Image: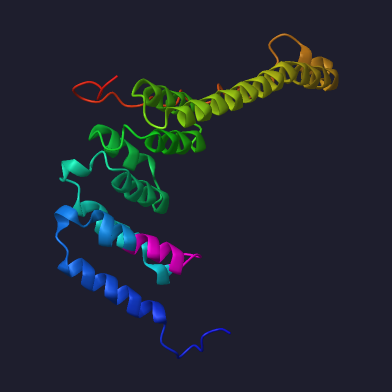
């Protein structure tokens, strides 16, 4: 049965308990418990998300607490917090640039998989491929999962390239047909030397090259 609108939400009491635990915890050892436990509980208690979950607000409070705690930079839980934050905001790419520049999470394949997925979704295919490649160079674990994901990405890009090639091959024939039709409709006066004709719109080159994975100051973080 659904809870009556005016009845207290039992989740509110649990939330207050977590808040009390946060007040008693010290930042140096509170990431896994209670912060991560609090985040996981919120996801489970509010499976549909929404404003009542206050998940973004919680993650926004958590992440900065540990931004200078270098012993967490290679911690998979800290990486999960950061990636969750990236999932909840409008432009996730900026989060991965930040993590990359600070060497956060780079030994975990989860970092490279997530970054590459964000870049691919934005059609920055060259940068996505470089993210996979850099992760493989870093031997991010589990390496097999990263290699499999990269293979899948390359297969998608190959299919994408074949599709584009077919479309480009078909385009000139279609254009020539339209040109012949237009010429057939022209009067002798329009076809005469020096006569004004409508200018066709130049074909798009497909846009600028996608950006690459940024070069980090001071070189990479291992090979």
Task: State whether residue 63 is above or below residue 140.
Answer: below
Task: State whether residue 87 is above or below residue 127.
Answer: below
Tell me what residue is drawn at x 77 percent, y 21 percent.
174
Outermost residue toward the right in this view = 184
Tell me what residue is drawn at x 41 percent, y 72 percent.
52
- Protein image colouring: rainbow
In the foreground, 151 or 175: 151
Q: Quadrant of the N terminus?
A: bottom right
Q: Quadrant of the C terminus?
A: top left
Would you identify the image quadrant in which residue 70 lies? top left
Q: Position of residue 130 (x, y in %)?
A: 41, 23
Q: Position of residue 80 (x, y in %)?
A: 35, 47
Instruction: Report whether 206 appears left or right of 141.
Output: right
Residue 160 belongs to the span the image colors magenta: no
Whether residue 221 is visible: yes
Residue 49 belongs to the span the image colors magenta: yes
Q: Position of residue 45 (x, y in %)?
A: 44, 69
Instruction: Report whether 28 appears left or right of 124.
Output: left
Would you identify the image quadrant in which residue 156 lies? top right
Whether residue 124 is visible: no
In the foreground, 127 or 18: 18
Q: Position of residue 72 (x, y in %)?
A: 22, 44
Task: State whether residue 194 is above or below residue 122.
Answer: above
Task: State whether residue 18 is above or below residue 174.
Answer: below
Tell me what residue is drawn at x 26 percent, y 62 percent.
34
Segment tinted magenta in the rendering: 38-50
In the foreground, 22 or 169: 22
Name the magenta segment's main secondary structure.
helix
């Amino acid at each position: 049965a659904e809870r009556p609108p005016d009845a207290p939400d039992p989740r509110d009491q649990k939330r207050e308990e977590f808040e009390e635990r946060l007040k008693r915890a010290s930042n140096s050892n509170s990431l896994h418990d209670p912060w991560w436990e609090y985040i996981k509980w919120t996801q489970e208690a509010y499976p549909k998300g929404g404003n009542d979950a206050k998940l973004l607000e919680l993650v926004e409070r958590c992440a900065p607490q540990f931004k200078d705690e270098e012993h967490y930079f290679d911690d998979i839980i800290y990486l999960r917090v950061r990636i969750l934050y990236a999932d909840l905001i409008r432009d996730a790419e900026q989060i991965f640039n930040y993590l990359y520049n600070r060497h956060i999470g780079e030994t975990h394949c989860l970092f490279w998989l997530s970054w590459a997925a964000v870049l691919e979704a934005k059609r920055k295919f060259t940068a996505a491929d470089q993210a996979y490649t850099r992760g493989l160079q870093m031997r991010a674990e589990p390496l097999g999962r990263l290699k499999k994901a990269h293979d899948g990405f390359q297969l998608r890009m190959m299919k994408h390239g074949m599709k584009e090639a077919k479309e480009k091959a078909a385009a000139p024939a279609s254009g020539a047909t339209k040109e012949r039709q237009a010429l057939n409709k022209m009067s002798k006066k329009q076809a005469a030397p020096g006569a004004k004709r409508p200018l066709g719109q130049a074909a798009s080159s497909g846009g600028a090259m996608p950006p690459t994975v940024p070069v980090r100051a001071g070189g990479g973080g291992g090979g």
